Image (cartoon, coloured by chain):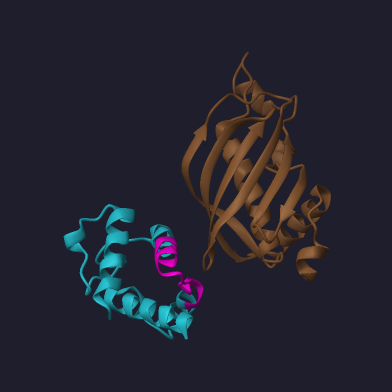
């Protein structure tokens, strides 16, 4: 994970959801630890999409979690979210 | 405008799928029970209905973009401004544009103009999901026909 990805995401979350920046850590779970709900996450997704020029596949992730094929940790623990962002950015450049 | 049925849009005037913009007309009725209560002696189109009208314009745009395969639901209203009173009988010209198409949501911006004057504006977040009930889709198709929604162009395009 590139640290700059985490910094960008953490700053977006801090600003969008009015959460103190120091509370936001790579191990933080956006939903369970930071208390971000699905509607607030849309604003975060919007800002992430814009900042990185990608489209977070939120519907696919939600479907996978609902179907029991993935856990929320895989997508919403911030270091995992950042790794997926890096993957989407890399795929875009490929 | 069938205000009691929350069907606020009368006519799609312009739809630009490439530019992701829409312009619609909505005629505020001269009479409605709503105006008897809101307010006695000073009838006004309720501000929440102006916001709803903007959401419906943005929603029709999203329906066009998604080729009528999915429904849009209002999820967030941001920085809504109601700049002046709207009274019975006035014609609303509503514009909406998609700022960002996300996965399962769209960020949009809409405004209402009355007699060439900007009257309200807001940024609106819409959730986009499959039609939850076939009756809803059927009703939307029926309204689409009435307001001049180009069913053919988006589906063929």
Rendered residue at 44%/66% (across/down)? A49
Query: Is residue B29 in view?
Result: yes
Report the label total.
0
Question: What percent of the width, then of the height, locates residue B124?
Answer: 52, 49
Q: Nearer the viewer, residue A75 or B131?
A: A75
Query: Is residue A67 in view?
Result: no
Rendered residue at 30%/72% (across/down)? A5
Residue A85, quarter of picture? bottom left
| A54 displayed left or right of B10 | left
Q: Nearer the viewer, residue B122 or B19?
A: B19
Chain letter of the brown region: B
Magenta span: A46-60
Question: What percent of the width, then of the height, locates residue A9?
Answer: 31, 66
Q: Nearer the viewer, residue A27 or A90?
A: A90
| B151 displayed left or right of A10 | right
- Quadrant of the image for the N terminus of chain A? bottom left
| B150 displayed left or right of A75 | right
């Amino acid at each position: 994970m590139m640290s700059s990805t985490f910094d960008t995401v953490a700053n977006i979350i801090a600003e969008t959801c009015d959460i103190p920046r120091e509370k936001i850590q790579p191990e933080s779970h956006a939903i369970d630890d930071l208390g971000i709900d699905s509607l607030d996450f849309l604003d975060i997704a919007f800002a992430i999409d814009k900042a990185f020029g990608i489209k977070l596949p939120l519907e696919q992730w939600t479907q996978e979690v609902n179907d029991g094929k993935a856990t929320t940790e895989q997508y919403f623990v911030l270091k995992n979210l950042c790794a997926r962002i890096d993957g989407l950015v890399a795929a875009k450049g490929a | 405008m069938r205000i009691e049925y929350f069907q606020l849009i009368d006519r799609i005037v312009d739809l630009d799928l490439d530019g992701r913009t829409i312009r619609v007309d909505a005629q505020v009725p001269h009479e409605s029970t709503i105006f008897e209560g809101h307010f006695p002696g000073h009838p006004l189109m309720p501000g929440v209905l102006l916001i709803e009208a903007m959401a419906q314009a943005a929603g029709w745009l999203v329906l066009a973009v998604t080729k009528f395969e999915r429904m849009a639901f209002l999820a967030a209203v941001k920085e809504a401004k109601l700049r002046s009173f709207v009274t019975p009988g006035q014609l609303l010209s509503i514009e909406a544009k998609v700022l960002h198409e996300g996965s399962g949501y769209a960020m949009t911006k809409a405004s209402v103009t009355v007699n060439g004057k900007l009257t309200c504006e807001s940024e609106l977040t819409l959730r986009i999901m499959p039609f939850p009930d076939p009756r809803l889709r059927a009703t939307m198709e029926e309204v689409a026909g009435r307001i001049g929604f180009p069913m053919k162009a988006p589906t063929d395009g």
